Image: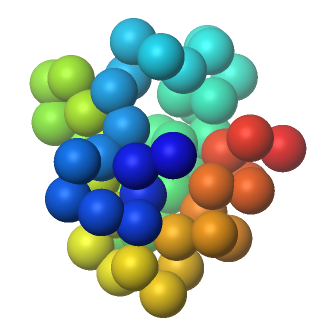
Amino acid sequence: MGLRCIIGIEKASLTDKMIEKAEILCDGKKLISTKTHYYNDNFFLSDELALYILG
């Protein structure tokens, strides 16, 4: 996943459930959302965020 770098995650590649979880993280200021991508600005949390979205 692109949470470990500035590339981010393309929203089109996520399932509806994953998008729902990513939006929760955005509400909690853990991810940044644009029209097409999610970005993580704290690379120390990358693995935990990815596990949450995938889980």
Above or below, comparing residue 12 to residue 6 in the picture:
above
Quarter holding residue 14: top right
User: Between residues 36 and 23, which one lies in front from this camera angle?
Assistant: 36
| Residue drawn where x is 37% and y is 38% of the image | 9
What residue sits 21% from the left and 23% below the top? 36
* Residue 1 visible in the current orientation: yes
In-image side of 34 versus 5 (left or right): left
What residue is shown at x 74% (from left), y 41% (from top)? 54
Q: Where's residue 10, x and y in %?
A: 33, 27
* Residue 40: image location, x then y, percent: 33, 63
Residue in view at x 52 percent, y 70 percent: 46
Question: Can the viewer see residue 26?
Answer: no
Q: Residue 22: x and y, percent? A: 52, 42
Which residue is at the far right?
55
| Colouring | rainbow
Instruction: Decide: is 26 above or below 16.
Output: below
Q: Measured along the vertical axis of the image, is residue 35 above or below residue 9?
A: above
Q: Report x, y in % for residue 5.
A: 30, 63
Who is closer to the viewer here, 52 or 9? 9
Figure quadrant of the C terminus: top right
Q: How many marks?
A: 0
